[in-house]
Every structure is written in structure tokens, then in C-alpha cells.
Amino acid sequence: MFEAIQFIERPGRPEPMESHLGEFEDEMAAVEAARGARREFMTGSEAEYAWWVVRKQGAQLANFIADSKSDKEFVLDLTSGELVEIT
């Protein structure tokens, strides 16, 4: 199982708001949910910054990372431990 999570920083709040976007049987479904939430944020949010992660349920390590400051997306290369940009 994979989970997609959204974090939004709002002015005046010390911690980002965390929203659970859902649990998914496969990683690609979770990534698509995160991408959809990102598109929605980019078209209508008043917040300044947000980021999205996909990870195995309960894990600390993210498989997919994207944020609202750029159009780049990253995945974690488990063999090297480095983030790799999706092109």
C-alpha cells in the first residue's frame, strides 16, 4: 500500500497543514493523486507553498516528491539513496 500526502504552509501557522490524500494499491495511482492535488493547488490556492509526497504506508522515506515552487518532480533511487529528477 502507498499513501499520498499533501503539506501546505499557511501564513501565521508554525507547522504545515498535513492532508492525507488516500491509500493506494500501487505507487502510480498514489503519484497520480499527488499530481492531481498539485494541479488543484496551483490553480486556486492562496497559500504560498505546498509539497506532496508518496511513500509506502507508514514509511519515513518518500518515493515521490514535488513542490509548488517548481515544475520538477523527484523519485528516490534506492540503490544510491539520491533524489533523481523525473524528466
Image (cartoon, rainbow, N blue to C red):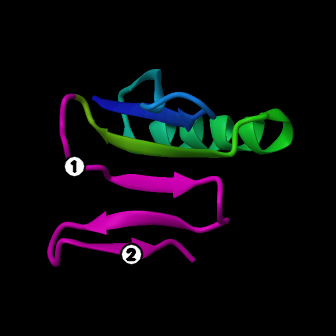
Q: Is residue 86 left or right of residue 25?
A: right
Residue 66 colored magenta?
yes
Residue position for label 1: 61
Q: Residue at x 46, y 36 (%)?
A: 30
Assign a secondary structure to mark 1. loop
**Could you tell whether 46 is left or right of 81 in the image?**
right
Q: Residue at x 85, y 41 (%)?
A: 43
Picture coordinates of residue 3, whole percent (x, y): 36, 30
Q: Which residues are magenta?
A: 58-87
Question: Is the C-beta separation of discs 2 and 1 under 8 Å?
Answer: no
Q: Residues within 10 Å of mark 2 (few under 14, many from 20)?
A: some
For the N terminus, the image quarter is: top left
Give the quarter of the image for residue 5: top left
**Sequence-wise, which precedes: disc 2 or disc 1?**
1
Could you tell me the amino acid type at mark 2? Val
Residue at point 56%, 37% (across, down): 9
- Disc 2 secondary structure class: strand
Residue at point 56% right, 35% down?
8
Q: Which mark is residue 87?
A: none
How many numbered discs? 2
Left or right position of 86 against 37: left
Residue nearest the viewer, comparing 21 with 25 = 21
Q: How far across and down, in percent of the image, does residue 52 sit?
A: 50, 43
User: Given the image, on which type of amino acid does mark 1 rest?
Assistant: Leu
At which x and y percent is residue 40?
76, 35
The residue that disc 2 covers is 84
Towards the viewer: 42 or 46:
46
Q: Quadrant of the C terminus?
A: bottom right
Farthest-out residue, right: 43
- Front residue of 19/12: it is 12
Task: Give the distance between the C-alpha atoms of the residues marked 2 and 1, in whole angstroms.
Answer: 14 Å
